Amino acid sequence: MNGRAQTYIRTPDPISTAGITAALRGRAEIEVVPAQMITAETVGVVAADTLDHDTLDVLRAVRRLGCRRFVLVAAVESDSALIPAVELGVRALASRAEATGHRLAQLVVSTASGGAAMPPEVLGLLVKQVTRLQQTVLAPRGIDVNGLSVRESEILRLVADGMDTREVATRLSYSERTVKNVLHDITSRFQLRNRTHAVAYAVREGLI
């Protein structure tokens, strides 16, 4: 990046694209790049009227070009698309009214360095969405919001305490095969190398 945050801009119309491009291109900390220069480090700036299913489609399209993190300029009128947007890589959100060149540059630089910036009201909507998901979808299946079942969390905690498969099985009254299968499921789901990697990942991500 040569010390500059790369960004690719996608909006619904040429006038909006030109406006955002002009606002960012003159800033020393920003490098606006065309689609063919996108890398995994490029921050996508996507502008839309509202965060809806059409906007999600745009995010998916830009993600296919290579962007993995996004600054979204849009109004949030419903919380139904919030979690999908975050899953697609939206790390910062601004309304059109606050999307000045200075503010967009701040959000792009922050997102490029791994930060996130969501308005308080949007965070509130996200919390409601996650709570609803936990109550109506995950809890009836015995899964916590972190993606682990109660049994998986118990087994990982004991492995983290240094217990081997036999000791875990004895403590929880499971067969050794069950413990091995659970650990295999966890490593496969999160694409981890082994149980040590699984424990390290779970601790780092706050899953246990």
Image (cartoon, grey):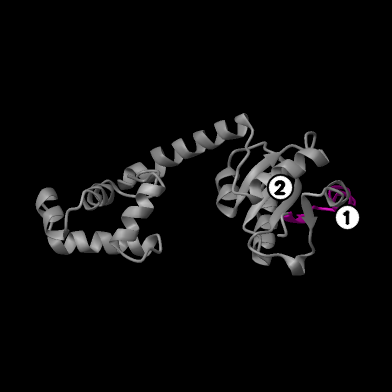
Residue 131 image position (x, y, % from top left): 45, 36
Q: Is residue 194 above or below residue 77?
A: below
Q: Amino acid at mark 1?
A: Pro
- Residue 152 in picture, x, y percent from top left: 27, 51
Which mark sits nearer the N-terminus, 2 or 1? 1
- Identity of the residue furthest to the front in this view: 3
User: What residue sits 34% from the left and 62% below the top?
Assistant: 187
Left or right relative to 141: residue 118: right
Residue beneath the point at 60% across and 52% down: 89
Numbered disc 1: secondary structure: helix
Label of residue 108 in the image: 2
**207 displayed left or right of 65:** left
Q: Nearer the viewer, mark 2 or mark 1?
A: 2
Amino acid type of the residue that numbered disc 2 sits on in the rendered structure:
Val
Residue stretch in magenta: 4-20
Q: CA distance from mark 2 to mark 1?
A: 21 Å
The quarter of the image holding the C terminus is: top left
Label 1, residues with CA under 10 Å away: few <14, some 14-19, many ≥20: few
Give the camera-side residue of 190 and 37.
37
The x and y percentages for residue 145 are 40, 43
Query: Please, what secondary structure does the residue beneath circle 2 have?
Result: helix
The answer to whether 141 is drawn above or below residue 36 in the figure is above
> Would you name the residue on which mark 1 appears?
14
Instruction: Check residue 18 for magenta coloring.
Output: yes
Count of marks overlaid on the render: 2
Q: As drawn, is 168 to the left or to the right of 191?
A: left
Choose between 12 and 106: the one closer to the eye: 106
